Image (cartoon, rainbow, N blue to C red):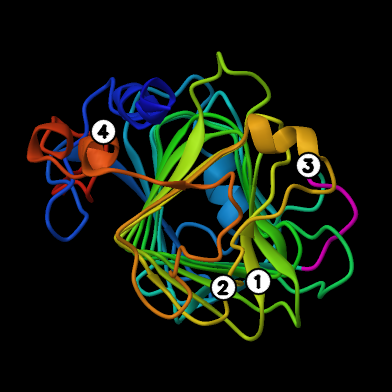
Amino acid sequence: MRNRGQFILYFLLALWSTGTNFSEAGIATRAPKIGRLIRVEPSGKGDFTRIQDAIDAVPSNNLELVFIRVEPGTYHEKIMVPVDKPFITLSGRSASNTIITGSDSGDIFGSPTVSILASNFVGRYLTIQNTYGSGAKAVALRVSGDIVTFLACRITSHQDTLLDHVGRHYYSNCYIEGDVDFIFGNAASLFRKCHVHSVSRGGGFITAQHRASPSENTGFVFLGCTITGLTNTFLGRPWGPYSRVVFALSYMSSAVLPQGWDDWGDASKQRTAYYGQYECYGPGADMSKRVPWSRVLTGEEVSPLLTTDMVDQQSWFRNAPSLFN
């Protein structure tokens, strides 16, 4: 158990292999000083009125930091940042007034309102939503690029809200809402100080992590988060047999079911899934009635999440540049 418990260390070493520097506010400080500024404004006072047009204006194989400032408004469009356009920052001024909205359903790769395929992407102060409603797969955000950060964003739908597909991802101070498997995929991701809210009317699932083999260094870590819900919800179920999810130092409301986890009707996954909890609190954090195949993690096992040696590294998170060419 101890060796398997050390996955957190290996997971974070991979996550931070390019260096990560999260300040106490969850924001890193290193950033290029010069970038290209593109303004999107619905009334036509900016460079573009549509976000996708601004992304399309970025050249293929881009090597320049491009800062797309999205002015307040509601943008009814589907957004895709293609794989050949890295180094884009898409930034609103506040998630409360900068809204990207869609309502597609039916396919996890076709329905997303926003799809990030490129590496070195930053999303800030945006609401990304899929308003289709319950009863079908309706992704709000797909993240398939490597080295991707979302800061202070609202990501909302019902089923399959956030397709945290592949790559290394960091979500800080985000609000994520849904009902069934609404944080799912096979990325290596850290959720820090996020509010995760279930709108399930009963028996929903927050996570469905898809790790398929013990050789895959992927998983979801929720650190210092708040977990709430309308009614009862599970913390997760194993989409992949080696699914890995850890909650640490997080508040769990009474919406979290006492058993915590579900095996998705396949008892064999109980032997391979890795579901852990460390010093969480609140009425839903009681471990006494958790399924026996979940884990109470020790300080030694979880320490790589908490030590300054791990979190005070050189960052790949970018703030806004101070100059534009």
Alpha carbons under labels 2 and 4: distance apart: 34 Å
Disc 2 crowd rating (10 Å Cα; few below 14, some 14-19, many 20+) is many
Nearer to me, 253 or 295: 295
Q: Quadrant of residue 2?
A: top left
Given the image, on which type of amino acid does mark 2 rest?
Val
Pointers 3 and 2 in contact (C-beta within 8 Å): no
- Tell me whether the residue at label 1 lies in contact with that at label 2, contact meaning CB atoms closer than 8 angstroms: yes
Which is more N-terminal, label 3 or label 4? 3
The disc labelled 4 sits on which kind of residue?
A: Trp
Q: Which residue is mark 1?
A: 233
The answer to whether one can see residue 145 in this image is yes
Residue positioned 21% across, 34% down in the render:
20
Q: Residue at x 54, y 44 (%)?
A: 55
Name the residue carrying label 2: 256
- Circle 2: element type: loop
Tell me if residue 80 comes above or below residue 195 in the rendering. Answer: above
Q: Which callout, 1 or 4, points to the residue nearer the camera?
A: 1
Residue beneath label 3, please? 109
Residue 35 seen: no
Q: Secondary structure at mark 3?
A: loop
Camera-nearest label, 1 or 3: 1
For the residues marked 1 and 4, what is the alpha-carbon distance in whole angstroms? Answer: 34 Å
Tell me the residue that label 4 is attached to: 316
**Image quadrant in which the N terminus is located:** top left
Secondary structure mostly seen in the magenta stretch? loop
